[in-house]
Every structure is written in structure tokens, then in C-alpha cells.
Image (cartoon, grey):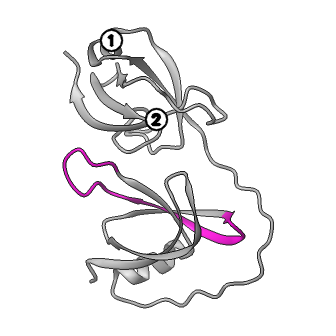
Amino acid sequence: MAEIINLTVLQVNQYALTEPTVQSVPVSVVASPVDTLVNGVQANSLVEVPPSGLNQLSQNLLVEETVSQIANLANGGTTTTTTAAPTTTTTTVAVLSFIGRVGGSSNDACNGSNVTLYTTGPLQSGLYPQSGIIVYSDPALTQPITSAYVSSPGIGQVWECFNGQLYNQQSCG
């Protein structure tokens, strides 16, 4: 079984690359199927690369390879990608909601008022946020949370938040 695999990356987090780039990633990635175009090139998977160390953020990559091709690479296989003429597609993303609190400090976020927050997930047990996800204040996913902290009263945890992305999970109180 491989420990590192090479994927053709089209977009890193919210930033589209000017041309596809091969990037080496650990096999511990989480891949989900997508059907979207990035600069006219078909993206087939959304890959979450776990943080590489303390105080690091995970990366979300849109890649050419399909989920089954990524699994094959992780198991030591090879893959060939055939690029066809681009087509216009519409991607529907499942928007998940959860009850959270936001604030300028961890104390404010832990003791603030409940609000509905939105993400594409994943959520722990389908209900609670986790490190690495991006959190929004609107169901259209256009306004990432800009407060410094987000908490989940249901599990008594608080995260630091940068451009909507949660990291550095801690206990409230």
C-alpha cells in the first residue's frame, strides 16, 4: 500500500490554479465525488488533506482523479486520466446546518447566543462541527464566519476560526 500518492490538483481551498499541477499527498486523505469545472478542466473529486502538524489547517483540493482512481492509487495501483472536451455542469452541494455560537474570544463564543451556522461538512454524528470545515453564516455559503471563535454548545467545544475555517479545537470553560 502506498503512503504518498500524486494527484492532479485544479484548485486549493478557494483558489483555482492557472493550470493543473501534480501534488503529492498522504493516503490518509478523505475523497468525495464532485462534478464541476475549474478553468475549463473537469474536477472529479474533492480531497481533504489532513493538517501536517500542530496549528496547521487541512487543505481542500479539487482534483481530476475520481474517488475510485484515488482508492486504486492508495492501494498501490496506477491510473490514467483521459481528458475530454469540457462540458458545462451544475454542481449541487449538500448544505448542512448546526447550532453554534460565535465571538471575538473563546469565552464570548462559549457563552454567547445560539445561531444557525452552515457548512458542507462533514459534521460529527451529523450534528456537530469539527476542525477543518468551513463555516458560513448563510445557507448560500457566501459569507464565511469572520469572528475569531466558533463554539458548539452541544459538545462544549470551541475552535479558532480563520476565514470561516475551524482549527485548534479546545474545551469551553
Q: Quadrant of residue 97?
A: top right
Question: Percent position (x, y) of residue 135?
Answer: 48, 34
Q: What stretch is highlighted in magenta?
A: 36-57
The residue under the point 31% across, 30% down is 159
> Label 2's element?
loop
Label 1 vs 2, first from the N-terminus = 1
Relative to the observer, which residue lies in front, 164 or 71? 164
**Which residue position is annotated with label 2?**
164
Element at label 1: helix
For the N terminus, the quadrant is bottom left
> Height in image: 167 above or below 74?
above
Q: Does the magenta stretch include residue 51?
A: yes
Q: Residue drawn at (33%, 41%), measured in percent from left and top?
A: 131
The answer to if 114 sits in the magenta stretch is: no
Query: Which image quadrant for residue 73?
Result: bottom left
Please tell me which residue is depicted at 73% across the width and 84% down the height of the picture: 84
Give the quarter of the figure containing the C terminus. Answer: top left
Q: Where is residue 105 in the image (x, y as percent from the top left)?
A: 30, 17
The one of 112 and 54 positioned closer to us in this rendering: 54
| The image quarter in which residue 149 lies | top left
Residue 93 placement, left or right of 54 = right
Amino acid under disc 1: Asp
- Relative image position of residue 72 (x, y in whole percent): 42, 83
- The residue that disc 1 covers is 108
Q: How many C-alpha atoms fall within 10 Å of the one at disc 2: few (<14), some, or many (≥20)?
A: many
How many angstroms separate mark 1 from mark 2 (CA)?
17 Å
Q: Residues within 10 Å of mark 1 (few under 14, many from 20)?
A: some
Residue 4 rendering spot, x and y as whole percentages: 30, 77
Q: Which amino acid does label 2 sit on?
A: Gly
